[in-house]
Image (cartoon, grey):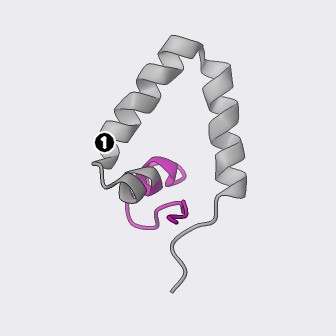
Amino acid sequence: MKRIYRSKTDVKLAGICGGLGEMFNVDPTVVRLLMIFATIATGVAPLLITYVIGWLIIPEGKPE
């Protein structure tokens, strides 16, 4: 089972989109664009709150 981690190398703000891109083998830019679209479609507050919670609870980097 794959675990999600925040990326240490592909970071723009917290590394969450980079980590999702690594997990699903997708370019992190595509994940970032989907996040922007979802933010516009659902309103800023729900996705912003979800992102901050993810920032707090998702561990950074893969364990060695």
x 27%, y 48%: residue:
27
Q: Residue furthest left?
A: 27
Q: Residue furthest bottom?
A: 64
- Residue 2 in the image, given as x and y percentages of width and height: 50, 64
Magenta residues, start to end: 1-19
Would residue 26 appear left or right of 5 to someone viewing this image? Answer: left
Local SS, label 1? helix
The amino acid marked with disc number 1 is Thr
Of residue 12 and residue 4, the one placed in the foreground of this image is 4
Would residue 49 appear left or right of 10 to someone viewing this image? Answer: right
Specify whether residue 3 is painted magenta: yes
Answer with the quarter of the image where residue 43 lies.
Answer: top right
Classify 30 as above or below 54: above
Classify 50 as above or below 53: above
x 30%, y 38%: residue:
30
Neighbourhood count class around disc 1 (C-alpha, 10 Å): few under 14, some 14–19, many 20 upward:
few
Most frequent secondary structure within the magenta stretch: loop
Specify whether residue 24 is painted magenta: no
x 54%, y 52%: residue:
14
- Residue 64 in the image, given as x and y percentages of width and height: 50, 87
- Residue identified by numbered label 1: 29
- Residue 21 in the image, given as x and y percentages of width and height: 37, 51
x 55%, y 80%: residue:
63
Answer with the quarter of the image where residue 9 lies.
Answer: bottom left
Would residue 53 appear left or right of 64 to someone viewing this image? Answer: right
